[in-house]
Amino acid sequence: MKMRHCLIALSLSASPLHAADLTEKAFQEIAARAFQPVIKTYDIPGMAIGVSIGGKQFFYVSGEASREAKTPVTTETIFELGSVSKVFNVTLAALAAERGLISLKDPASTYLPELKGSAFDKITLVNLATHTSGGLPLQVPDAVTNDAELTAYLKSWKPPYKPGTMRSYSNVSIGLLGRIAGQRLAGSYREAAEKQLFPALGLKSTFISVPDAAKDRYAFGYSKDNRPIRVNPGVLDDEAYGVKTTIRDMTHLMALNLDQGGLAPDLAAAIRQTHTGYFTTAYYTQDMVWEQYPWPVKAKQLMDGNSNKMSLESQPVKALKTPLAPQKSVLMNKTGATGGFGAYVVLAPKSGIALTVLANRNYPNTARAEAGLKLIDALEKYTK
């Protein structure tokens, strides 16, 4: 009889786990194991982590939104996204394409007539969305302080590479894409994002300009010398790195990236379009901003893909003959930072896991990716 009871116990212990079996306590322990070492290593004042798994959402918060005021981080704390803002940018561009307002295959000068006769006659919107413009710089040059100066700079700019042959990560590239999409949808990027896109996605605390009523929830970022800072205004800032939001909103958004159910058909199609692959690099397939790895992914490959070399140096790419439709067996990620904030988002479609990490310190992308992969690996057992 004892042996029979033992066999039954073994059988039950081997039963597969599901998202419904993931308890709040278990998630808190998993998140802490993955990210508390990172928080300590990089002296991160505050962090918020959100996970969507099997339709359930979990949150882990740690530390302070303001060290000076001793304000704790909550799920309603507003963080700067930095370049994770580009996820919204390409969604707007894909939405404009779905509505027939633009074609991603068209040259950028089709929609920016002031650039007719320049290099932008041969740079498509897909090039802008995939950082394959031919070598546009990472940042808008310091000498460019307004739109007139930006136009003059772009008209005279000569690409060092043939468009579609090299990946040069660029706020200028994606900024122009957002400007085009925003103009076609609502007259400006900020209007299109704040008045159309954010409400359509069901986001309650996502802004480009944080309103007075929400400023008490807006965290301070911290510089390398521990000064409290926030992002400075600049040309193309709205489009390239200007979104501020909460972990609750971002977790909801990442869940929608896994499952578009309930969204308007054109918006659902736009999100899927952003998951389409156009170019291959040494480490990943380049989608519209998203970087797509095979799943399961080796840690070294993920670290190499998120290295400074990929973000700061031009790298060769190969154009796919046919764009790669959205895949299930992949891991997709995007990093972002401002002077005082660091953000990271990850999608693992086959496992039904989406992860967002927001922090008020800019810390290495590789540290985000390594800890994020550890967290996802630990959650995998709940998705079998």
Image: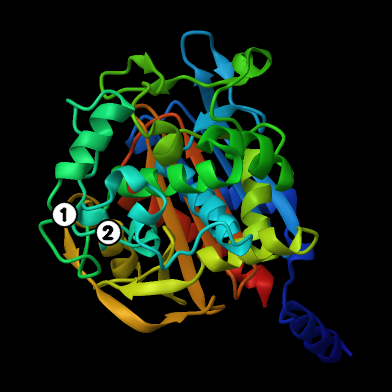
Q: Which residue is identified by label 1?
A: 313
- Numbered disc in front, either 1 or 2: 2
Picture coordinates of residue 124 (x, y %)? 34, 62
Where 192 sits versus 74, above or below?
Answer: below
Picture coordinates of residue 268 (x, y %)? 68, 63
**Quadrant of the drawing holding the C terminus:** bottom right
Which of marks 2 and 1 precedes in the sequence? 2
Q: Secondary structure at mark 2?
A: helix
174 lies left or right of 270? left
Residue 291 visible (yes or no): yes
Residue plotted at (17% across, 25% down): 143
Mark 2 belongs to which amino acid? Asp
Residue 353 visible (yes or no): no
Q: Secondary structure at mark 1?
A: loop
Mark 1 belongs to which amino acid? Glu
Residue plotted at (54% across, 12% down): 70
Depth order, front residue of 211/38? 211
